[in-house]
Structure formats: C-alpha cells, structure tokens
Image: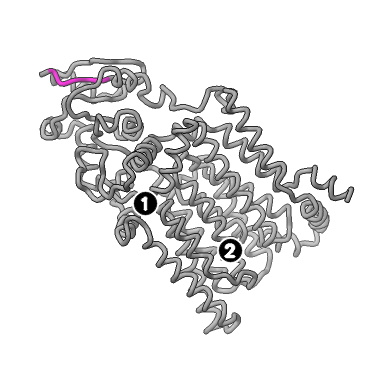
Amino acid sequence: MKNKSITFIFPSLSSIFFLVTFLAVLYQGNQMLNIDGDLGHHLAMGRLILEMRYIPQTDPFSFRTEGVLAIPHEWLAQIIFATLDNMFGLTGIVVLSSFLIALTFTLVFRESIYRSNCLLAGFTITFLSLSASSIHWVTRPHLFTYLFLAIWVKLLNSLIRGEEHRWWIFPIIMLIWANMHGMFVLGLLAFVISFIGWVWDRFLERSISYSLGRKLFLAGISSFLATFITPSGTHLWQTIFELAGGSPFITSMTPEYRSANFHLPGTWPFLILLGIILATAVLSGQKFGMSYALQLSGWILVGLYSVRNIPLSSIMLAPMASELLAGWLSSSSALSGVRVFSKKLMLIERKLGNWLWPVGGVGLSIIILATGTSLDKSGKSYQFLPEKFPVAATAWLEDYPQQGRMFNEFDWGGYLLYHLWPSQKIFMDGHTHIYGDQLSREYVAIMARSPGWKESLEGYGVSWAILRSNNPFASSLHEGGWQDIYRDETTVVLRRGD
C-alpha cells in the first residue's frame, strides 16, 4: 500500500509529456490566434447558430454569395468555440486548443510506446511528430480532427491486431467527427488503405484471417453511412469534393493548401521523421505485409501533398515509425545499452501511470489565467493583436457605422465578421471554397487594379473600403476621389468621394 501511494504521487512520463505540451501551446496562444482571420468566421457562425437555433445551408456573411450553397461542415466545433468565447473570451478557445493538442499527442505517445515496446523510440518519434504538427497550430476546428485521428488510429491498430472486437464503435466516433470537421475523410481513408492491404495479404499471401476483413468491412461501411447523419445530408460530401478538388488558383491564394517548402525550418521535423522511417525500414530488416507498406506510403504521400496535412500524416505515421526505430535498436548489438535503459524506463512508466498531474496542471493553469496572469510568451492576454488585425479601426466603425457595402482585405474578413456582422456584410474572407474560382479571381483582379476593377466595385455598390495602411490599392482609390475617413498604423478606412 505504501509503494502504491508513492507511485501515485510521482508523475509518469506520459503525464509530464502532456503537461509540457499543454503549457508549450499556451505559451504560443497569441501566435495561434493571429496566424489568420478564419477564427472570426467560425465564431460568427457559431454565434449565429446559437442565437437563431438553426444551421444555415447558404452563406449569410457576404453580399456576393447570397444564396450560394455553403455547408457548415464544422458546425458542432463552431458552436463549442462560440460558447467558450461567450463564457471566457478568447482565453477559453486557447485553453481548449492547448488541451486538444496535448491530449492528441499524449495518445500518440502511448500508442507509439505500446506498438514499439520501447519508451525511447516512442518518445523520440512522438516528439518529432509533435514538432512537425506545430506548423499548423491554429485555433480552428481542425484541432478536433487531430484528436479524433489519434483515437481512430489507436482503435484501428487494435482491431487489426485482434485486440479490439467492437467494430461498431467506429461509426459512433464517425458520427461525431463528421459533424465536427470535414477531415473525417481521413478516417475513412485509413479503412480503405487497411482493407486493400487485407485483401492483398489474404488472397495473395494468405497470411491473414478472414474475420479481420469482415470487421474492417463492417466498420468502414457503417462509418461511411454515419457521415450522412448531419444537418446537410448528402450535401456534406459535395462540399468535401469541392474542397479536395479546389482550383489551382484558389490553392495559390491559401499557402496551407500547397505542398510544403522543405527549405523552411518549420518543415524539418517532418523531414527528419520521414528520414528515420526510410532508414529504419531498411536497417531493421523487418518484412512488411502489404497493409503495413500501404499505410506507410499512403500517409507519407498525404503529408507531402499539402502543408496542412503534415500534422495529420505525423499522427498516423508515429506509431509505425516508433515500431521501426525500436526494431532497428533491437537488431543492433552496438545499442544494447540503449535497449536496457529503455526497458528500465518502461518499467517505471508502467508503475507511475496516473491522472492526478494532468488534471491538476490544467486546473492550475486555468486558475492562473482567471486571475489575469498571462501565460503567453508576449506577456499579453490572449487577444487579436492590433498589428495583425484592424482592432482600433473596427472599434471606431462600431462607434461610427458606415452606410453601404464595404470592400475588405480577404484575410481580415473573418475578424470583421466577428465584430461587424450582421450590420455589415463582407466582400470576401478566407473561406475561398465558398466564393469559388470566379469570385476569388474577381477579388484578386480588383486588388491588382486590373482593367475593369472600378466597374466591379461600382457594380456591387461598394461605397467604402477597409485596407492595410500600406496597401498600394489605397493610393489608387485616392486617385479615384476616395477619401480617408480613418487611419492608424495598421488600417485605413476610405469612402467613395461622391
């Protein structure tokens, strides 16, 4: 009894990993809030749903897209975000985002050390996976997908190993996931890859049981059917296909949709992770089945396809990479001391598992934040920063509302919705899939002062604009008789002269 009490007091490595990650994300809270303006769009939509008690199926925010189909495929996450904002402000959203990231990668860590039976391998790979994911730490609904994907890969691996027999748990998770964020398709992709691998191993290699294929099929089909139980029904998949098949022009407007630039340091942890996978796949001498090989290659390709997929790819690859690294460590006689040390750490980890430290750490952080103390590296409270967004200008517009339609910088659109909607509708925001290729090109043509840009503004009845103070487009408006009615270091508000 005495030994149990002592082990309960000391935190496990998993608990330490969770707390350090949670605090590290809190430390970058303002950076996450201010990467782009999409959070404002999500908060405006969540607020609308809560107030009106319905989920709109067309875009309510821009006068250019009235009546255009715009499926809110993140409506449940938007409600959660808006509720937290109403109760605790942006601090509540940062705390939730930190919790989601920390819990996600703690689950990845635990699955990695379980798969590899090597704590050092699991920790090394999970740390790389966490570091790779930081390239897309943004306070947006996609963080829920991180958590669902970590849960999904753990359960799917257990199903493949024969440890999990409840295939019906997958459609239950998918039902929530499909209403939370559009990247639920990755869960279905995981089943497709696993089932194709099973078919190969079953009928060509004859090295795997029939019952596994039956479970994979039932879990996959029922999960797919669960995606239709949303407020949008079949229209949800229409939106998913539109997002997946976005035009090259729209992709060029949104850096996170493009493939990673591996010359940038932020991408190097993912590059190192891929290097370890390739090296240890050769050095470990393990023979892979088709299912394993497809999963490795498939999730690597997903990560290479776009920047925003790197965290998702890292989550799926981490347990397999840990297994490969552990296999190399066990096959190398020169690293026997490392293996012995890792086994001792594993014994300690199993004895120290408890929930006291994570719960206490999160609770204490919330109390500290509630006193007004900042945990952000800037020393500021969690907020939209005035050097990134038109904070002062928007406050002025709330006191002196402008008549007529506005033109705005598209990456400020979400922030303007958060503060000015419904009294003002925007010209455009970062949800480019709603505007499509034609309206997105029209916005770019106006900002570039291409032939016909004046006629475009007049055609929409635009009477005022809110722009960055150093935007050359403001000079062109001045030449056309537009006048400054507000200016600060970040923002200029102009009104048509007539």
| Residue under the point 82% across and 58% down | 336
Mark 2, other Cα within 10 Å: few <14 / some 14–19 / many ≥20 = many
Residue 457 in the image: state x and y as whole percent: 15, 31
- The residue under label 1 is which amino acid type? His
- Residue 309 tag number: none
Q: Is residue 119 shown left or right of residue 274? A: right
Q: Is residue 259 shown left or right of residue 94? A: left
**In front: 153, or 478?**
153
Residue 107 in the image: state x and y as whole percent: 62, 53
- Residue 155 tag number: 2
- The residue under label 2 is which amino acid type? Leu
Find numbered disc 2 in the image and state the secondary structure of the residue it sits on: helix
| Residue under the point 47% across and 59% down | 301
Residue 97 in the image: state x and y as whole percent: 52, 40
Find numbered disc 1 in the image and state the secondary structure of the residue it sits on: loop
**Residue span colored magenta:** 493-497
Give whichever of discs 2 and 1 has the lower sequence position.
1
Circle count? 2
Quarter of the rendering occupied by the C terminus: top left
Q: Which residue is mark 1?
A: 73
Q: Is residue 485 shown left or right of residue 116? A: left
**In front: 122, or 105?**
105
